[in-house]
Image (cartoon, helix red, strand yellow):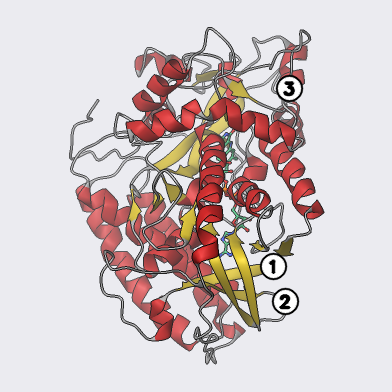
Amino acid sequence: MRIKTDFLVIGSGLAGLVYALKVAEYGRVVLVSKTKIDETTTSYAQGGIAAVTYLPDSYEKHIQDTLRAGCYLNNETVVRMVINESDKMIKELINWGVRFDKREDGIFDLSREGGHSEKRVLHWKDRTGFEIQRALIEEVKKHKNIKLLENHFSIDIITQHHLGLEITRRTQDIECYGAYLLNNKTQKIITVLSKATLMATGGAGNAYINTTNPTIATGDGISMVYRAKGMVSDMEFVQFHPTALYNPKEKPSFLITEALRGFGAILVDKDGKEFMKKYDERASLAPRDIVARAIDNEMKQSGTNHVYLKCTHLEKNELIRHFPYIYAKCLSIGIDFTKEMIPVVPATHYLCGGIVIDEHGKTTIKNLFAAGECACSGLHGANRLASNSLLEAVVFSHRAALKSIECYKNVKHIDAVPNWDSEGTVLNEELVLITQSLHEVQSIMSNYVGIVRSNLRLERALNRLAIIYKENEDLYDKSILTQRICELRNIINIAYLIIKFAKNRKESIGLHYNIDYPVKK
Ligand SMILES: Cc1cc2nc3c(=O)[nH]c(=O)nc-3n(C[C@H](O)[C@H](O)[C@H](O)COP(=O)(O)OP(=O)(O)OC[C@H]3O[C@@H](n4cnc5c(N)ncnc54)[C@H](O)[C@@H]3O)c2cc1C
């Protein structure tokens, strides 16, 4: 089967939905989700979206906080651009029907998160992402130009390589003609030809054992682009959220938003003693990398599996009013956070690196754009400031949409693109191999490429990964394609990139902490 469209959008989170809504005013759009439209990381976002709205806040303060969190490895031009556009983007979200909490006097009820010098995070209770996803999906479903393909898995983007041309260098002129999609219900592979394609596939938390990311976050977009010889960057900067709920059997790990610490909750050890002041003057509100490393250290020193977050000193009704979702979740596992401490542990949360894009969301591959967590715009540098990722997703989707609208009319579909050549024979009895390899990769990444790294651990990780890579490529070549084997292949690719970038960085900075190098401030 072949589909021709003007715009192809791979991913239905915030980045994909915003772009789809904008380009749909100009042409036909195919919007793809590998599962259901609302099964995205966006739906899980709790804290909110950072934007400059009222005095005494200013663009300059938000810019400086972002640069400081990113250890000044950020692209300052991009930081200024994104933050200067923040309030305009919030208005657009509101126009699409997104609700943000307001105080009784009608102004936004802003919260403050770690690393922010002002209260500037707009939120909808503690389920901001869910609300954003809800409102945008309603708009998308109303739009006659948007064709939604749920349960369709994008295997690879189509380039000159599929016309038989050898692409040997990442600096070569590469063009994107669309993508091959696997229909998960029929197991048939569809060829989608598009004039402009947006990669909006989100992050890659599932490269690790413990993650706050939903199971869809397997780094597919980054791997597809890397395989097609597009440029990828900053992959060593993996953010661990310091406070996931310690509940070992639960996947994904449930996040306890930083906003709770912004509200006054404090991190304590098993004896109820506050420990963060030993590590940073900002105590429980220090940036995430510092807090995650401090918790890691406390756990190692005390031999415990977690520390605690204490909110029992806070006003009960206000606490429940602001954090009803977390309250209900904790109650469901027998913890009343107004009376008891919450056990918490760090978990992989966000990937700062990804597909290199310019200020218009353009990748190094022609007619291919990227936005959201799969992209690397230069906003975050060595560490992401809390609640800047939803902002980044919306700004770059908007900008990518403007550029796509400008360019797509001059692009022709390439009819010579062949359909997918599928010849695999190995069937489901090999599922056990996929499951086992996935556990092996996740354990290599968690044990050797986690919060604390060393040259020796990275070397070990790379050697072990090489074996799994080889085995999986053999299996992939023989197999009838399934989403699971493709995801495993992508996770191996992501693991390789994280290790490679980590090995190349000869310093400890931001999210990349290697005991063989002193911390660069
Ligand atoms: C628990 C949690 C809380 C968070 N809280 C906040 C917060 O408060 N503020 C903030 O700014 N950020 C927060 N983040 C980060 C933020 O939610 C994400 O960075 C952001 O939502 C990513 O949006 P996205 O559109 O790039 O990707 P996603 O929302 O993850 O969407 C990805 C889409 O791509 C699709 N997809 C993936 N691979 C394929 C494929 N091969 N084929 C077809 N489709 C594919 C998926 O099906 C999905 O539709 C949080 C993250 C987590 C995990």
**Reading the chain from its start, which is encountered first: label 2 or label 3?**
3
Q: In which quarter of the image is residue 75?
A: top left
**Reading the chain from its start, which is encountered first: label 1 or label 2?**
1
Q: Is mark 1 on a helix, strand or loop?
A: loop
The residue where tag 3 is placed is 101
Q: Which residue is drawn at 33% across and 66% down?
A: 465
The residue where tag 1 is placed is 151
Answer few, some or many: residues within 10 Å of disc 1's Cα (few below 14, many 20 plus, some between 14 and 19): some
- Return the x and y of residue 333 as percentages of the image width and height: 72, 37
Q: Which amino acid does label 1 sit on?
A: Asn
State whether residue 237 is above or below residue 48: below
* Disc sitting over residue 185 in the figure: 2
Q: Is mark 3 within 8 Å of ligand 1?
A: no
- Return the x and y of residue 245 as percentages of the image width and height: 60, 36
Answer few, some or many: residues within 10 Å of disc 3's Cα (few below 14, many 20 plus, some between 14 and 19): some
Q: What element carries label 2?
A: loop
Are the two marked residues, 1 and 2, in contact with CB atoms closer than 8 angstroms? yes
Give 326 or 170, whichever is nearer the viewer: 170
Q: Which residue is drawn at 20% across and 38% down?
A: 507
- Return the x and y of residue 239 as percentages of the image width and height: 43, 40
Q: Which amino acid does label 3 sit on?
A: Asp
Q: Which residue is drawn at 39% across and 63% down?
A: 365
Rounded to the nearest angstrom, the CA distance separating label 1 from label 3 is 33 Å
State whether residue 321 is above or below residue 425: above
Can residue 402 be seen in the rendering of this structure?
A: yes
Rounded to the nearest angstrom, the CA distance separating label 1 from label 2 is 7 Å
Give 201 or 302, whichever is nearer the viewer: 201
Q: Which residue is drawn at 59% across and 45% down?
A: 248
Are the two marked residues, 1 and 3, in contact with CB atoms closer than 8 angstroms? no
Q: What residue type is labelled 2?
A: Lys
Looking at the rendering, in which quadrant would you find the C terminus? top left
